[in-house]
Amino acid sequence: MTVLKYVSLAIYALVCVALIVLTLIQNKDESGASGTITGSSTNNFYDQNKGKTKEGKMKRWTIILAIAFAVLTIVSSIFYIA
């Protein structure tokens, strides 16, 4: 059980560092909430294919790492309670 605890802790640390790095290197979305209120979004080719760009892939990996972070937080708390 202790080996599993240390392995999950090491994975948790790697996920934390990767999440921090990915978050810091992403560009800020200019439109944000005000863009949705004013309706400044256009329906062009780039907006439809954002997921295939570098920024789209980084955003997807950030979401995946955030979910892994949440799951590993719960798993770590279970290991340290028991």
Image (cartoon, rainbow, N blue to C red):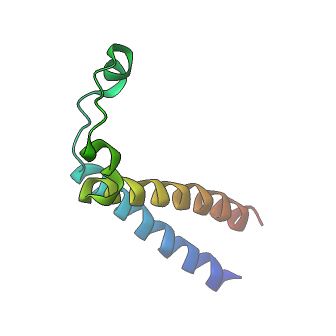
Q: Can you say which quadrant of the picture contains the C terminus?
A: bottom right
- Residue visible at 30% across and 42% down? 47
Q: Can you say which quadrant of the picture contains the N terminus?
A: bottom right
Residue found at the far bottom of this picture: 3
- Residue visible at 46% across and 53% down? 63
Residue found at the far right of this picture: 82
**Quarter of the image where one finds residue 58:** bottom left
- Residue visible at 67% across and 64% down? 75
**Where does residue 12 sit, x and y in percent of width and height?**
50, 67
**Where does residue 28 sit, x and y in percent of width and height?**
24, 38
Which one is nearer the viewer's eye here, 49 or 8? 49
Please state if 29 lies on the left or on the right of 3 as rendered: left
Residue found at the far front of this picture: 44
Relative height, residue 45 to residue 37 (above, below) = below
Relative height, residue 3 to residue 58 (above, below) = below
Residue found at the far top of this picture: 38
Relative height, residue 33 to residue 11 (above, below) = above
**Where does residue 44 sit, x and y in percent of width and height?**
26, 39
Total marks in image: 0
- Residue visible at 27% across and 53% down? 55
Please state if 17 lies on the left or on the right of 6 as rendered: left
**Quarter of the image where one finds residue 36:** top left
Which one is nearer the viewer's eye here, 52 or 31? 52
Which one is nearer the viewer's eye here, 43 or 69? 43
**Quarter of the image where one finds residue 2:** bottom right
**Where does residue 38 sit, x and y in percent of width and height?**
32, 14
